[in-house]
Image (tube, rainbow, N blue to C red):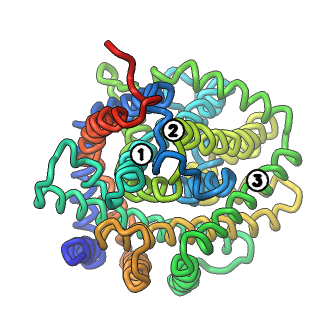
Amino acid sequence: MLPSAAAVLALAAAGALWPERFGAAAKQLLLATTTNFGWFYLLTVFVIVVFLFVLAVGPYGRIRLGPEGSRPEFPFFTWIAMLYSAGFGAGLVFWGVAEPMSHFFTPPFQSLEAQSAPAARVAMGYSFFHWGVSQWSVFALAGLGIGFMQFRKGRDGLVSTALEPVIGHRPVVRTMVDVLSVVATVMGIATSLGLGVLQISGGLQSVAGWEGSLTLQLLIIAVMFAAYMLSSTTGLHRGIRWLSNVNLGLCLLLLAFVFAAGPTVFVLNAFTLALGDYLSHFIEYSLRLTPYRGGNWVRDWTIFYWAWAIAWSPFVGAFVARVSRGRTIREFVFGVLIVPPLIACVWIATFGGMALHEDLYNVAGIAAVVDKDVALALFTLYRHLPLGELLSVLSILLIFTFLVTSADSATYILAGMVSGGNPDPRQALKVFWGAMMSLIAGVLLAAGGLASLQTASLVAALPFAGLLMLLMVALVRLLRAESLHVPHARPPLR
């Protein structure tokens, strides 16, 4: 615990005391890794997608994450709600309008005319791609490795333990992997809390006219801390489970209203077309780079997204594993890779599709607003709907509960990480790491170093990408050994 806490405090202190210098250094380091190793990120994520689908449809797909005969710990709706809340958090609410409108305003391909019908089509298809199977495959792989060792083999829920078949029992290597996992999780959640607070503050200013002052932002953090500590300390089966169900229910309620009140037929057509574009261009987008023409679009969007997912994989993977006990590998892979991404695509088609419709046919100017401030995307859209102010209030509440769910999940997983992968960590550890995340978010908001810490957190993606490749090798070795004891899961004879 001490090495992890010391590393986190050192990085947070650097971001608070020297925000500009720390930010410049972090930006240069991230730029160097994404520029020189962007190809590695793309290949890693693509290989993971293929690996997981082959694993799910093959003979190993029947093996359970738990003893033979065990059954899922949570019902299907609750399981999906918990996956959705921890994996997407407030990100989808934030980017559901902002991303397609950003691509509509600045198209992914130079040959496309900005704010044209072809640009709108590509914008929707690319948004599906970024929030689809690829991002979730990273979480699924980490979760599968951790869950297999934890529930099938009775070991702890650490990334280093899942990698044992490859890295062995080297204490120094294992400690480095575990410390890096804790640091990446704390920095990622702290920056997400800070950015979410900025969005809530902007929403309150838009709805109620409250000035987005530092005092208001710190007050939001304090309320959020109290909420997620209450949720986390009540346990996985009470607070986290209940909040996750609330999140998904509120999401579906907003989704149904906007779908019914907006251009319904246009949304259905846009969804169907975008789904076709996503499937037909999946390989092209997965491996797209521009070495002959140059440009930064792929690096700024696709590679950035993959870096974010990879850096978060220890936290989200550990949580996905923890709530998936008792499911077969086939259920796990298809559940994680299909259902949350499908919900995301429906959300993007509904909210982003309506925004595109308003700009294309009613010259609403939403894309221009988004280009200046992405935080206003959703609230600008609501001005074109009935009950817009009520929708804004509900969305602020949804962002808040999403952030609370992500934070309480993180405190639960962090406490487990620093206590040797314990699935039921002590309350004191949850309180410590929960307070650490809020403290870091508040200090960096005050010092202006939030973006710097977010940039620094993404640098962890490079070593984790290598670890994910090793994890695939480790899983194959584990499953081959396990299949000898499970007759129906044995691979075919050569």
Q: Secondary structure at mark 3?
A: helix
Residue lying at 46% horizontally and 25% vertically, measured from the top left: 58
Q: Earlier in the sequence, mark 1 or mark 3?
A: 1
- Tell me if residue 66 comes above or below residue 302 in the rendering: below
Contact between labelled residues 3 and 1, with CB atoms less than 8 Å apart: no
- Tell me if residue 165 comes above or below residue 170 in the rendering: above
Q: Which mark, by number, is residue 333?
A: 2
Q: What whole-number distance in Å separates the C-alpha atoms at marks 2 and 1?
A: 8 Å
Q: Secondary structure at mark 2?
A: helix
**Can you see residue 308?**
no
Q: Which is in the foreground here, disc 1 or disc 3?
A: 1
For badge 2, the amino acid type reads Val
Disc 1 target residue: 144
- Between residues 29 and 82, which one lies in front from this camera angle? 82
**Can you see residue 36?**
yes
Q: Which is in the foreground here, disc 2 or disc 3?
A: 2
Q: What whole-number distance in Å separates the C-alpha atoms at marks 2 and 3?
A: 23 Å
Contact between labelled residues 1 and 2, with CB atoms less than 8 Å apart: yes
Question: Which of the image's four quarters has the C terminus?
Answer: top left
Residue lying at 56% horizontally and 71% vertically, measured from the top left: 404
- Mark 2, other Cα within 10 Å: few <14 / some 14–19 / many ≥20: many
Q: Where residue 184 sits in the image (x, y, percent)?
A: 32, 61
Disc 3 target residue: 252
Q: Earlier in the sequence, mark 2 or mark 1?
A: 1
